[in-house]
Image: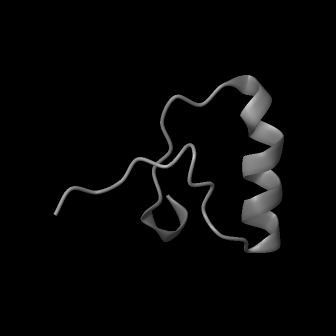
């Protein structure tokens, strides 16, 4: 997985935003991101 980012509760409607961010080298989509526990 690129940059070890995991997303959760993703719906088909989120796919376009995720791909656009990955292609543009953008930041993770925080509202979908699964945060790593320390």
Q: Residue at x 72, y 71 (%)?
A: 26
Q: Where 36 sits versus 14, above or below?
A: below
Report the front residue among 7 and 30: 30
Residue in the foreground of this view, choosing between 35 and 3: 35
Percent of width and height locating residue 13: 78, 28
Q: How many marks?
A: 0
**Is the residue 17 above or below the residue 9 in the image?**
below
Q: Is residue 9 left or right of residue 11?
A: left
Say left or right for 27 vs 34: right
Residue placed at 65% from the left, 69% from the top?
27
Quadrant in which the C terminus is drawn: bottom left
User: Is residue 32 found left or right of 13 in the rendered image?
Assistant: left
The image quarter containing residue 36 is: bottom left
Residue that extends furthest to the left in the rendered view of this protein: 38
Residue appearing at x 80%, y 66% in the figure: 23
Farthest residue, direction front? 31
Q: How is the image coloured?
A: one colour
Q: Residue furthest bottom?
A: 25
Residue 3 in picture, x, y percent from top left? 50, 70
Q: Where is residue 2, by image quadrant?
A: bottom right
């Amino acid at each position: 997985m690129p940059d070890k980012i995991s997303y959760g509760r993703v719906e088909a409607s989120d796919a376009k935003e995720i791909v656009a961010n990955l292609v543009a080298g953008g930041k993770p989509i925080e509202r979908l991101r699964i945060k790593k526990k320390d």
